[in-house]
Amino acid sequence: MKWHCHMPAGERPEFLVVGGPTASGKSAVGLELARVFSGSIICCDSVQLYKGFDIGSAKPSLEEREVVPHLLFDEFDWSEPCDAAIYAAKARLAIQKVRSEGRIPIVVGGTGLYLRALLGDAWDDDIPSDPELRASLAERSSDDLYADLKARDPRRAAQLHINDRFRVIRALEINILTGSPVKDLSQPSAQRPRKHLMIFMNPPRDELYARINFRTTQMLSDGLIDEVRELIHSGVDAGCKPLGSIGYKEVVEMLQNKLAPEDLETAIATATRQYAKRQVTWFKKVPSDAELARLDDLRDVIDAIKHADFI
């Protein structure tokens, strides 16, 4: 466990953050911290925010949500938009609510863009948007969109997966409207006072990939395909944002006969590993107070927080 506190001397954090790549153990750590410090967990996962997207997002179970309060899970219907600014506004209200109840807010998730907005760097608040332009871009293929973004803004393209159509389109939209690349999303703002303690979950690469492989197998065994079928049967648009996320996207492609059933598990695991690698790169550039390689080190973090009299 690496511990280096960035909180100003004599100040206490308003909330804790548990961030890191998918399958790194964030939910387990968040749950234990909430138990120890009388906390409430606030979602920072762009898919867990949506109702009905449970298995593929590894959403906390109902049993886990009964142990401590969980906020912002199942916050949106599939057709409702959510971006970094919308999320940050809701998360700030949730933090205020939890603090007013005398509990410790614990923000848990791996969606870096949403977390960055919450921590005070709402980079896109004043950037223009054009629904007609966005609709026009949406008509193009993923390969074409990504190649265009790579030519205009190679740095932003490197941060995104070719199939992350929502963010690729948004990046192109910003570039076309402003004539400039998207501002570097890897550097946190240093201008706002720090109000949080950050715990970065960073297990060894081989261990992380093994967890991803196991989770992929488990999701399929738990009924991911049936979950997607039911979502579409209930009227969810197969092209909506949450169904475009890793795991859901591959199942949709299989149901549309664009991906062979025998290739499904490998496709999901591969895409997830690639995403986790990008998440690790992002979180390494965000100042953290504690870096955990293994869940066994959590007790040291708890002791450090108690020793510093933060909570």
Image (cartoon, helix red, strand yellow):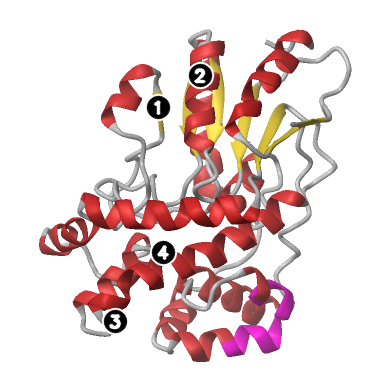
Few, some or many residues within 10 Å of mark 1 (<14, 14–19, 20+):
many
Asked if disc 3 and disc 2 are in contact, CB closer than 8 Å, the reply is no
Name the residue: 61% across, 45% down: 20
Few, some or many residues within 10 Å of mark 3 (<14, 14–19, 20+):
some
Residue located beneath label 4 in the image: 246
Q: CA distance from mark 1 to mark 2?
A: 10 Å
Q: Looking at the image, is mark 4 or mark 2 earlier in the sequence? A: 2
Percent x, y of residue 155: 73, 74
Front one among 138 and 65: 65
Percent x, y of residue 254: 24, 76
Q: Taken as a whole, is the magenta stretch helix, strand or loop?
A: helix
Position of 12 compared to 172: left or right? right
Q: CA distance from mark 3 to mark 4?
A: 14 Å
Mark sitting on residue 70: 1
Q: CA distance from mark 1 to mark 3?
A: 36 Å
Residue located beneath label 2 in the image: 34
Question: Does the image show residue 50?
Answer: yes
Q: CA distance from mark 4 to mark 2?
A: 28 Å
